[in-house]
Amino acid sequence: MSEVLDLACALIARPSVTPDDAGCQALIAGRLQRAGFACEHLRFGAVDNLWAAHGAGGPVLVLLGHTDVVPPGPREAWSSDPFVPEIRDGKLYGRGAADMKGSVAAFVLALERFVAAHPRHPGTVALLLTSDEEGDAVDGVRRVAEAFRERGQRVDWCITGEPSSVARLGDLLRVGRRGTLSATLTVRGVQGHVAYPDKARNPIHQALPALAELAARQWDAGYASFPPTSFQISNVHAGTGANNVIPGELQVLFNLRYNPHWNAERLERECEAVLRAHGLDYAVQWHRGGEPFFTPEGPLRAAAREVLAAFSGALPEESTGGGTSDARFIAPLGAHCVEIGPVNASIHKVDEHVAVADLERLPALYLALIERLLG
């Protein structure tokens, strides 16, 4: 078994369902300390974060990852135990194999090899891990970034190991992400009998025109390589379950995924202006998941493009699609951020897996990037 495969299996065997790190970071810190890294454990609430750095000064290159995984779901639906790594038909199976313990294992190998070959490298190379990427993402990299800002820790370049590839390793380079803004909207009415609507106020009837206006709105036409901003209602709930009762309250969950035309504050104002214009008696709780970020042309993007082209045999697609990642918390520190990782077809699914051949190539891919930037 190769060294990266062995480490990936050791991480998968630790059932680190968000926010429990289950000892993954201690294992990694022990290895990197032996390689000469200074390791700092940053625990906030129930979340473990690890900062392991080698070198001094700038430029500062950070490899960003997470040790937590999503729940496996019904174990009987898996072909093998999700926390017992198993190799079948050239694939490594287990929860986190692709998202993202495979990348984390490859990060560790690349870092060990880089500092062994370049013990006096310029600048700083570091690994930042959290156990709160798949969860609320409150006490993970978000809090670490706040601590970095307070103590003046600079970050110039950030490579996130999220599974970004589509069909083959290295076919896609993530150069940005949309922002995400979620809301819990409560519309208040007056409960009553459906036969006497004059004695009640139906919050569903009142809210529908406002929601239809928000859903039909063209927020923008896109931005650079970003798609247009989208508004999606994800849940609507009201009523007692009886068909003869007008409900007294309606709750709606919705989300906006937005490009750099917007920020969360402006979107909140726009949405609430619509709600007020329709005369709703409402309350809304907003959750700002992260602002959009975009990495322009520069040393990081150029190095990533060339390294991926060498590994995949063709220039990668450069994309801002997908959901969100923890890079959204690092980018506001002034860092240029890209995301590079294995094929994402099985992430969060039953029988999650990564191709062994891809996993065994990942350390060399990340090492090539580090050497291009700091070698």
Image (tube, grey):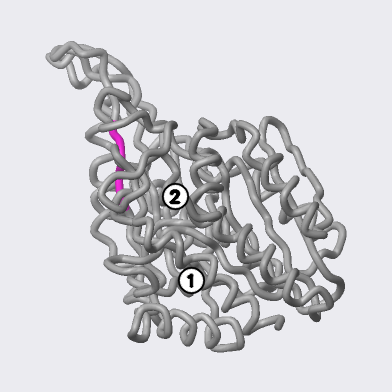
Disc 1 vs disc 2: which is toward the camera? 2
Position in image of residue 136 (x %, y %): 54, 39
Q: CA distance from mark 1 to mark 2?
A: 18 Å
**Label 2 belongs to which residue?**
99
| Label 1 CA crowd tier, 10 Å (few <14, some 14–19, many 20+) | many
Report if residue 276 lies within the magenta region.
no
Q: Is residue 227 above or below residue 198?
A: below
Asked whether the beta carbons under mark 1 and mark 2 sit within 8 Å of each other, the answer is no
- Is residue 206 or residue 213 the one in the foreground? 213
Q: Main secondary structure of the magenta part?
A: strand
Position in image of residue 66 (x %, y %): 57, 48
| Label 2 CA crowd tier, 10 Å (few <14, some 14–19, many 20+) | many
**Label 1 belongs to which residue?**
176
Q: Earlier in the sequence, mark 1 or mark 2?
A: 2
Q: Residue at x 44, y 54 (%)?
A: 273
Q: Residue at x 44, y 71 (%)?
A: 174
Q: Is residue 313 above or below residue 222?
A: below
State the quadrant of the C terminus.
bottom right
Q: Residue at x 62, y 39 (%)?
A: 24
- The residues colored magenta run 232-236
